[in-house]
Amino acid sequence: MYKNFTGRVLKRATKIAAGLALLLLLWLVVLSIKIYTYASVSDPSPADAAIVLGAAIWDDAPSPVFEERIKHALNLYRTGQVQALIFTGGVGEGERLAESAVAREYAIRHGVSAAHIYCETTSRITYENLTGARRIVEQQNLTRVLIVSDPLHTRRAVTIARDLGLEASPSPTPTSRYVTRKSRLEFLLRETLFYAAYLLRRPFLS
C-alpha cells in the first residue's frame, strides 16, 4: 500500500513538474516573439534627448556594436529629432576609460556640441544604464527620451525605462552587427532570458 501511495504521489508530482515546465517554455516563447516583433518598432517623433545604452570599447574606441548605437544617435541629433545625447556605460573589465566617455569624444569629433552631451560613468548593465540616465533627465529637466540600442535589445530596455518613470520610446539602430542567422538567434535567446529574469525581479525592484 505504501509503495502504491508513494508511486501515485511521484507520478502526480512528475505531471505537475512537466506541466510547469511546459508553461515556462510557452512563456519564454511568447517573450521571444514580443522581443522579435518589437525590434522593428521605432518612434519618429521628436524627443528631448536620446539615451544611448553602453557597450564594450576596444582600445579606447567604440566596439562595432557600440559604434552603431553612437552613429544612430548622431543621426537623430543632426536631423533635429533630439536636442541632446545621454551616453551611458562605466569602466568595463579590462577597460581603461568609461564607455560613455569614449562615446562622448566620438560624438564631439563628429560635430556634436559638448554642451549637448551628458554622461553617466558608473553603470555596467542595462538597468544601471537607465537608472543613471534617469538622474540626468531629472537634473536637466528633460521630458521625453528615445532609447537607442540594438533592435533586439529595445523591448527590455524600453520596459525598464518606463518602469523607472521615464517617458521613453524606442529608436533602435537601423543596422546591426548581428547579421548572421546564428548571431541573431543567440542574441534573441540571450535577450529572452534576460527579459524573463527582469520581469521576475520586477515586483521586488524599488
Image: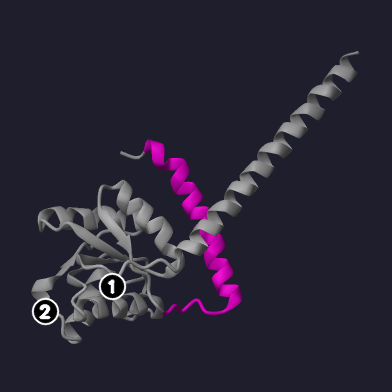
| Front residue of 166 and 46 | 46
| Front residue of 84 and 125 | 84
Quarter the N terminus occupies:
top right
Rendered location of residue 125, percent (x, y): 36, 58
Rendered location of residue 133, percent (x, y): 23, 58
Horizontal side, residue 25 vs residue 163: left or right: right
Residue lying furthest front: 45
Q: Which mark is residue 113?
A: 2
Rendered location of residue 83, percent (x, y): 15, 71
| Front residue of 88 and 26 | 26
Quarter the C terminus occupies:
top left
The amino acid beneath tag 1 is Arg
Rendered location of residue 134, percent (x, y): 22, 54
Q: Is residue 197 magenta?
A: yes
Earlier-in-chain disc, 2 versus 1:
1
Q: Residues within 10 Å of mark 2 (few under 14, many from 20)?
A: few
Question: Is residue 33 in sight in this rendering?
Answer: yes
Residue at the spot 37% in from the left edge and 58% down from the top edge: 157
The image quadrant of residue 5 is top right
Question: Is residue 60 in sight in this rendering?
Answer: no
Magenta part of the protein: which range?
175-204
Residue at the spot 28% in from the left edge and 48% down from the top edge: 164
Q: Is residue 46 above or below residue 65?
A: above
Mark 1 highlights which residue?
Answer: 96
Q: Secondary structure at mark 1?
A: loop
Q: Secondary structure at mark 2?
A: loop
Residue lying furthest top: 1
